[in-house]
């Protein structure tokens, strides 16, 4: 048991291990309150093997407690040490610690010896361990002359260190004159004894400053050996040196430098023995020589090496097993192996043990008349001997005590009395060491006392164990009971755990565990009680954990960590990187819930942990940050296997920056033909570092490589060395070979020349060959320079030719090319199309047919037929006027076509011509035709003049395109009242020869809307609209002027005008936002009901162009989009016809578009609203 005074407020650990340790500590020992009589207890002492610094005062510690306070005495080397007789030795007041002042005078060696401290009072005496005091030593190396060492390349070597024996032993390492550690490897390494071993030497091992250093940590000094000089030379050099300077006997280590199997440098022989003590580190070493350098392997015979305690050091030449035990005894085998053989060595390991405790004796507190035992049980190899002492005196010669009985490692006490109090020492020893333990027997009669502070507050996290202390003391041992609340019954172990030391454990504390608990201690001498308080808190939880992130270098990343906790606890948020503090860098910023890393760098990758700590618990969550970027450029480009048409390129990949490389892109530069221009050569997978590249002849290559990963492409590598391939004959011929005459008597042969890369050598030329396709002529050939055209003159007109263009250079010819067909120059066609016929389809469309011309008369590539047509005279006019000719072209062999966009009621003429690549042939005989009547266009203008009180006069101009004989005009009109509603619609027919009309009996001061259009026998044309207002009655105006002079009327009118203005502004705003007003809706709903859309006509149409320049007409609409025909509109428009830029036709030339005209609708009869009026019109209506 362990009873101790606890602090006022306690927070119990959340983890299981601290809880177990806490309980173990409480039951492992018994502390008697210091206000009670008790024997001495040693609390502090120096180590058994106490090595001191001879330059400082010697301090030998011995501290003890007891009641009454103990006195101290010392022995040295087994006899009493009288400190009063030595002026350099003092004892600290209230303590047994010795201070030996050797800094002023005296030597540390004088005070070497074995010291033991005794603490004594009236209840007994406790003794310390035997403390062996020795001063540390750091001796110098003995002076010696070291001869230079000369070796053949490949021989083995051992450079001895042999440091002076110091206390404690020195730490050995090898350095040069610059205090730089010498590099070590599988070939060169330092042994456990400090020697430097070379499995084989190389010329690079030559140096004059191999220096062994010994560091003595206790005195913080370093000693060094004389430098050793080593020279490694070849066999030839060695023979010359021996012949000139040395005899055979003076040569060091005369071994062959040829390759050889391994042999061991240490340990020697095939077997060796190693002894180690339990608990220490077992170190086994095997170092071998050989050429090539041997590799060391370790096995344990009849067993396996312990996985968690086995470590390899010194390039696997040293095997270490930590915390060694008797089970690690056995045979261990090291194997040295190289390509020429293997060698074995067996090390027999025996593990011995200094004494160690099985059961150490514990202090015993008894009341008079009670019984008890002291147990001292230890083990070791060999088995330790157990001996007892009482108050520092062997128990065999101590005063007899009838209450005790010795039984080997146990002392049995019965019916003890106060005189039985004493301190007992147990000593367990064997050849490897000893253990000494003090344990007292203290006989007391004490009522219970509770040592835990009253009203201690415990705070515990819910669902975790709660431990409530009740540290107590009493003799005899009190019994402990726990109660909850003021009237609660005793708590039992079915729900709670009652520990021997008085602690109450609640295994799983819940919210209802909160409250006051009372601990009661009783023995036959009395009773004591104490209250403690328990609060249960909500656990701290991370409800939003940081998440795994992959970010590109240079970007920003944010981790979120949101915490939920008990409201009475204030958490602190701590961010860690790889379980350490965040870097001290302003790029890292934290706030309540976030960690932000700006401008992320490669070193920022790792595990980031958010830890929320309260006074009671903590919670943590981690996330990994992976920093990625495009790869670093490849490097170390090398060209190997250089052949005429291939080369092998190898490279070393750059860092992939945490994103695997998916592929490598190889580019080349041709320094001879295209210097500075890099072209794509090849791509290979991201796992390859070699590529076999196909090459072209006569190219000065340089290569570079780029790496690509999921983030992007790296910068290019440095360019490789240049590689010039040998010249060769071209392996390809020019492309795009064509033969086409530009004149009737020539043939122009063209081709796309080869570039410098394709030339394959110097002196690039072309062999041009030709002959007539349908004749038996031989090929005619000519060799030309590096050009792209050759002209053959004197050819017949439009004759097919076979053509070949073959590349050649100074080395030879390219493969034989395939022949292509061309034609000599064309001439104009000789014959006009015959039997031209015209069929009128409707007033704007006609169909033309013709017979094809003979193929031979075309004298070129037939491109089609072209129709010229023009208007000769309108049927409604007798005077002739010139109309510009128009053209439609019909491609290919078509023999019919449609003429769209004709003027109704007009006379037309046309002719047809055949077209080839040279131009047009003669025209056919002109054919005339005329079109029937159509609907007229809208009147050219409409004006309303001379408004009076009840009349309006209309003036107009006839339609610009009557498209027939006008039969009459139609006028429709209707009034618009002050609320913008439409009145009844009035119809009026006007003779066709009129251009002026007066309407009478109209309402005064009224707005009217007029709809006006012309008619032929075919139907109504497009309408034109206008609005006008009749004048105001003068008498009424005078009366209004009289009223207007009245103040009340002026005020009324201003108010009404202001209200209307506000309403108009609101309406205007809504209209601008897309609103639709009833007036507009009604006007749209009452468009002209008599105007019908034109029917769709289908036909075959050609390409339209003007007669002079043959340019296509721009695409336009036959009628404007506002459904009225304006004056400037042309009836000659060919919208969507022909095969020009915008025309659409079927393969047979039939037109696939639609041709129709639309007119503005007339409003229906009735009070329908017109378009939304302006504010001015509204005011006019109002007055």
Image (cartoon, grey):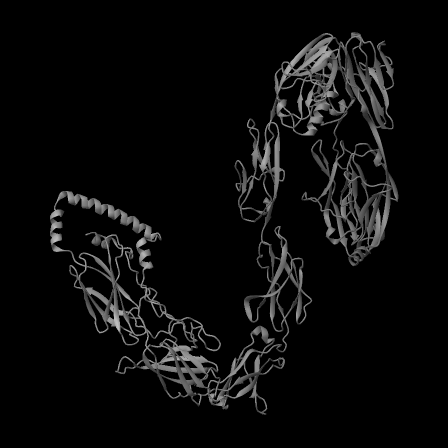
Which of the pair 1091/169 is nearer the observer? Answer: 1091
Find residue 830 and report its image quarter.
Answer: bottom left
Question: In the picture provided, is 1058 more to the left or to the right than 897?
Answer: left
Residue extending farthest to the bottom is 776
Query: Residue at 21% across / 46% down in the picture?
Result: 1056
Which of the pair 167/177 is nearer the observer? Answer: 167
Q: Is residue 1071 above or below residue 826?
A: above
Estimate the x, y position of residue 1084 in percent, counting from the top left.
Answer: 33, 59
Q: Classify the position of the N terminus by image quarter.
A: top right
Residue 475 can be seen in this image: yes
All told, the count of numbered labels is 0
Estimate the x, y position of residue 998 in percent, counting from the top left.
Answer: 18, 66
Q: Is residue 758 above or below residue 324?
A: below
Which of the pair 537/146 is nearer the observer? Answer: 537
Question: In the picture provided, is 797 more to the left or to the right than 20?
Answer: left
Estimate the x, y position of residue 951 in percent, counting from the top left.
Answer: 17, 62
Residue 34 can be seen in this image: no
Estimate the x, y position of residue 170 in percent, counting from the top left.
Answer: 75, 35
Find residue 603 and report its image quarter.
Answer: top right
Which of the pair 171/983 is nearer the observer? Answer: 983
Question: In the picture provided, is 772 more to the left or to the right than 140?
Answer: left
């Amino acid at each position: 048991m362990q009873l101790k005074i606890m602090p006022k407020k306690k927070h119990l650990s959340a983890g299981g291990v601290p809880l177990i340790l806490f309980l173990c500590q409480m039951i492992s020992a018994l502390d008697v309150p210091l206000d009670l009589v008790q024997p001495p207890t040693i609390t502090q002492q120096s180590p058994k093997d106490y090595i001191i610094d001879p330059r400082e005062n010697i301090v030998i510690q011995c501290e003890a407690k007891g009641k009454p306070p103990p006195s101290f005495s010392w022995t040295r080397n087994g006899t009493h040490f009288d400190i009063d007789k030595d002026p350099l030795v003092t004892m600290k007041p209230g303590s047994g610690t010795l201070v030996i002042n050797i800094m002023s005078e005296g030597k540390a060696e004088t005070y070497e010896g074995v010291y033991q401290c005794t603490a004594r009072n009236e209840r007994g005496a406790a003794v310390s361990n035997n403390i062996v005091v020795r001063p540390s030593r750091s001796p110098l190396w003995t002076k010696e002359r070291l001869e230079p060492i000369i070796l053949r390349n490949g021989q083995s070597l051992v450079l001895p260190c042999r440091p002076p024996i110091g206390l404690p032993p020195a730490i050995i390492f090898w350095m040069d004159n610059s205090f730089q550690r010498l590099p070590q490897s599988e070939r060169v390494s330092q042994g456990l004894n400090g020697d430097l071993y070379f499995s084989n030497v190389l010329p690079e091992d030559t140096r004059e400053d191999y220096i062994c250093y010994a560091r003595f940590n206790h005195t913080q000094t370093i000693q060094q050996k004389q430098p050793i000089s080593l020279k490694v030379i070849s066999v030839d050099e060695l023979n010359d040196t021996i012949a000139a300077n040395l005899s055979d006997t003076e040569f060091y280590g005369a071994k062959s430098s040829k390759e050889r199997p391994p042999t061991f440098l240490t340990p020697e022989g095939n077997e060796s023995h190693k002894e180690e003590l339990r608990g220490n580190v077992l170190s086994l070493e095997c170092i071998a020589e050989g050429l090539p350098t041997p590799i060391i392997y370790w096995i344990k015979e009849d067993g396996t090496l312990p996985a968690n305690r086995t470590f390899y050091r010194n390039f696997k030449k040293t095997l270490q097993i930590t915390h060694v035990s008797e089970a690690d005894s056995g045979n261990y085998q090291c194997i040295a192996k190289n390509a020429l053989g293997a060698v074995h060595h067996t090390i027999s390991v025996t593990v011995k043990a200094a004494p160690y405790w099985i059961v150490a004796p514990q202090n015993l507190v008894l009341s008079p008349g009670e019984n008890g035992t002291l147990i001292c049980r230890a083990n070791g190899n060999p088995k330790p001997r157990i001996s007892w002492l009482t108050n520092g005196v062997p128990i065999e010669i101590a005063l007899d005590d009838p209450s005790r009985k010795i039984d080997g490692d146990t002392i049995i006490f019965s019916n003890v009395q106060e005189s039985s109090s004493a301190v007992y020492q147990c000593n367990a020893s064997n050849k490897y060491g000893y253990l000494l333990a003090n344990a007292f027997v203290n006989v007391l009669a004490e009522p219970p006392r509770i040592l835990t502070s009253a009203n201690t507050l415990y705070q515990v996290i819910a669902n975790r164990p709660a431990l409530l202390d009740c540290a107590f003391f009493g003799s005899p041992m009190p019994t402990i009971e726990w109660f909850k609340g003021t009237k609660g019954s005793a708590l039992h172990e079915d729900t709670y755990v009652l520990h021997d030391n008085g602690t109450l454990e609640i295994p799983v504390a819940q919210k209802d565990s909160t409250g006051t608990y009372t601990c009661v201690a009783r023995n036959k001498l009395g009773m004591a009680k104490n209250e403690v308080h328990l609060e249960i808190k909500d656990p701290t939880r991370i409800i939003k954990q940081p998440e795994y992130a992959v970010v590109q270098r240079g970007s920003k990343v944010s981790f979120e960590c949101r915490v939920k906790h008990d409201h009475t606890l204030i958490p602190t948020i701590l961010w860690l990187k790889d379980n350490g503090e965040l870097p001290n860098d302003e790029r890292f910023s934290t706030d309540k819930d976030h960690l932000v890393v700006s401008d992320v760098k490669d070193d920022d990758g790792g595990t980031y942990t958010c830890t929320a700590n309260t006074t009671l618990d903590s919670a943590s969550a981690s996330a990994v940050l992976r920093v990625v970027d495009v790869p670093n450029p490849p490097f170390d480009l090398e060209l190997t296997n250089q052949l005429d048409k291939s080369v092998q390129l190898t490279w070393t990949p750059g860092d992939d920056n945490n994103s695997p490389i998916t592929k490598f892109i190889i580019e080349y530069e041709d320094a001879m033909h295209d210097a500075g221009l890099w072209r794509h050569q090849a791509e290979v997978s991201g796992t390859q570092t070699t590529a076999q590249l196909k090459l072209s002849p006569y190219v000065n290559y340089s290569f570079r490589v780029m790496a690509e990963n999921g983030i992007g492409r790296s910068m290019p590598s440095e360019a490789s060395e240049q590689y010039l391939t040998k010249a060769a004959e071209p392996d390809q011929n020019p492309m795009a070979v064509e033969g086409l005459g530009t004149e009737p008597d020539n043939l122009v042969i063209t081709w796309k020349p080869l570039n410098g890369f394709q030339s394959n050598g110097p002196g690039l030329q072309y062999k041009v060959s030709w002959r007539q396709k349908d004749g038996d002529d031989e090929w005619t050939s000519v060799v030309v320079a590096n050009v792209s055209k050759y002209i053959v003159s004197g050819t017949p007109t439009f004759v097919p030719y076979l053509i070949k263009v073959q590349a050649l250079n100074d080395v030879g010819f390219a493969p034989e090319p395939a022949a292509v067909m061309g034609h000599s120059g064309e001439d104009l066609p000789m014959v006009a199309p015959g039997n031209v016929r015209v069929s009128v389809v409707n007033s704007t469309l006609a169909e033309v047919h013709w017979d094809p011309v003979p193929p031979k008369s075309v004298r070129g590539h037939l491109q089609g037929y072209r129709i010229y047509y023009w208007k000769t005279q309108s049927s409604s006019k007798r005077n002739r006027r010139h109309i510009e000719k128009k053209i439609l072209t019909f491609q290919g062999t078509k023999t019919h076509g449609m003429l769209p966009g004709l003027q109704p009621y007009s006379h037309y003429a046309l002719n047809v011509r055949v077209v080839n690549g040279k131009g047009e042939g003669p025209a056919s005989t002109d054919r005339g035709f005329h079109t029937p009547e159509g609907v007229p266009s809208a009147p050219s203008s409409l004006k309303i003049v001379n408004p009076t009180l009840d009349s309006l006069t209309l003036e107009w101009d006839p339609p610009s395109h009557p498209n027939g004989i006008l039969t009459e005009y139609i006028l429709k009109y209707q009034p618009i009242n002050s609320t913008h509603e439409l009145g009844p619609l009035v119809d009026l027919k006007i003779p066709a020869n009129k251009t002026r009309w007066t309407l009478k009996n109209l309402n005064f001061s009224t707005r009217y809307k007029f709809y006006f259009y012309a008619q032929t026998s075919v139907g109504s044309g497009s309408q034109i609209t206008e609005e006008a207002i009749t004048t105001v009655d003068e008498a009424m105006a005078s009366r209004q002027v009289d009223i207007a002079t009245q103040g009340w009327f002026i005020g009324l009118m201003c108010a009404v005008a202001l209200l209307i203005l506000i309403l108009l502004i609101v309406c205007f705003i809504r209209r601008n936002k897309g609103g639709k007003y009833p007036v507009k809706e009604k006007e749209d709903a009452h468009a002209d009901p008599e105007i019908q859309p034109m029917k769709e006509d289908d036909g075959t149409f050609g390409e339209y162009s003007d007669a002079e320049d043959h340019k296509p007409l721009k695409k336009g609409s036959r009628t404007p989009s506002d459904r009225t025909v304006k004056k400037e509109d042309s009836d000659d428009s060919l919208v969507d016809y022909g095969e020009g830029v915008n025309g659409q036709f079927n393969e047979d030339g039939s037109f696939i578009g639609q041709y129709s005209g639309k007119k503005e609708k007339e409003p229906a009869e009735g009070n329908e609203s017109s378009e939304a009026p302006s504010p001015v019109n509204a005011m006019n209506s109002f007055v």
